[in-house]
Image (cartoon, coloured by chain):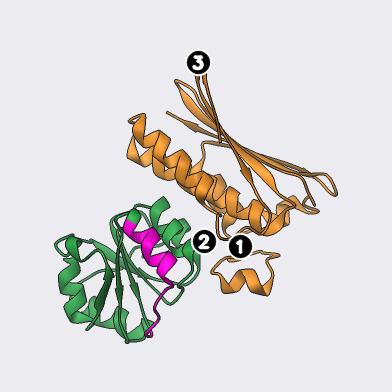
Chain colours: A green, B orange
């Protein structure tokens, strides 16, 4: 799914990285526990989260995650947006909750990741 | 950061400061950039990134401070994460997935899921940990190239 499609589906706005609208992600992961993201994420995945601290960007950097959606209307501080800009990570923000955002994307065909063969 | 060019590899060393959440991850980010410049396989880079980042966060969250040393050799990458205390009383318990001694404040930052050490072990081909209460903890990981 392309990032611009995700933006439209979630009624989201770009906080940074609008130039990466045509990037593709092959799955998504909704999570607020960074160590779980590190444990389970492998591919070009979209991360959905309500956490807005710099460590979200660092975790994304470590795993080559190139797009993050902040849910529940959360907007990270400017320093975090700037960090993402430097690392070429697209940041979006939506007012939908994590549950609804995940449901919308899943219902539109964006799969989650498999854990333990499930 | 200290960069020494040895005959048989490159050594990177970073100090990690206790409770410095603003800068946590900088060492791992720097290491990742060097590995990319060296043209190392992206799958290996990912494993090193996870191992060093989890180690770095552990030092920030749980210790009095420490350092991360990465030794890039022709056939393997050796990562050593060493801290100055307080040491781990029960290593087996610490290695259990989901077990964490992280404070409430740390959990609010998204950490403390209790996956740090298990993630480090999973990312490496060889994993060693030793610790002494009141002295410190050393984790050594080897990732084969």
The chain to which mark 1 is attached is B
Task: Please indicate whether residue A70 sits to the left or right of residue B127 in the image.
Answer: left
Q: Position of residue B94 (x, y in %)?
A: 69, 56
Q: Nearer the viewer, residue B96 or A18?
A: A18
Mark 2 lies on residue: A35
Q: Which residue is mark 1?
A: B114
> Which residue is painted at 39% across and 78% down in the image?
A75
Quote the CA–CA distance across marks 1 and 3.
36 Å
Q: Residues within 10 Å of mark 3 (few under 14, many from 20)?
A: few
Describe the element under mark 1 as helix, strand or loop.
Answer: loop
Q: Nearer the viewer, mark 2 or mark 3?
A: 3
Residue under pointer 3: B8
- Depth check, front residue: A72 or B87: A72
Closer to us: B51 or A8: A8
Taking the magenta stretch, the answer to whether it contains residue B74 is no
Say whether marks 2 and 3 touch (CB < 8 Å). no
Q: How many marks?
A: 3
Quick one: label 1 or label 3, which is nearer the N terminus? Answer: 3
Q: Which residue is the extreme one toward the right?
A: B134
User: Do labels 1 and 2 touch, CB within 8 Å?
Assistant: yes
Give the residue displayed 45% in from the left and 64% down from the top: A56
Q: Which residues are magenta?
A: A72-85
């Amino acid at each position: 799914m392309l990032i611009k499609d995700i933006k439209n589906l979630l009624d989201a706005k770009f906080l940074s990285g609008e130039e990466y609208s045509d990037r593709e992600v092959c799955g998504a992961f909704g999570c607020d526990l960074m160590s779980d993201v590190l444990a389970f994420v492998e591919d070009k995945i979209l991360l959905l989260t309500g956490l807005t601290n710099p460590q979200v960007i660092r975790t994304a950097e470590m795993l080559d995650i190139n797009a993050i959606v902040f849910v529940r209307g959360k907007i990270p501080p400017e320093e975090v947006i700037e960090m993402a800009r430097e690392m070429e990570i697209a940041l979006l923000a939506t007012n939908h909750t994590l549950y609804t955002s995940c449901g919308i994307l899943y219902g539109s065909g964006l799969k989650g990741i498999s854990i333990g063969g499930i | 950061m200290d960069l020494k060019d040895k005959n048989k590899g490159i050594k990177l060393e970073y100090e990690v400061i206790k409770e410095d959440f603003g800068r946590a991850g900088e060492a791992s980010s720097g290491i990742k950039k060097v590995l990319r410049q060296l043209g190392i396989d992206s799958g290996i880079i990912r494993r090193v990134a996870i191992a060093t980042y989890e180690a770095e966060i552990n030092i920030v969250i749980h210790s009095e401070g420490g350092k991360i040393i990465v030794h890039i050799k022709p056939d393997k990458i050796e990562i050593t994460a060493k801290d100055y205390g307080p040491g781990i009383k029960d290593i087996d318990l610490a290695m259990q997935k989901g077990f964490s001694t992280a404070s409430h404040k740390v959990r609010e930052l998204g950490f403390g899921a209790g996956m740090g050490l298990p993630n480090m072990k999973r990312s490496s081909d060889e994993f060693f940990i030793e610790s002494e209460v009141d002295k410190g903890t050393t984790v050594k990981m080897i990732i084969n190239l």
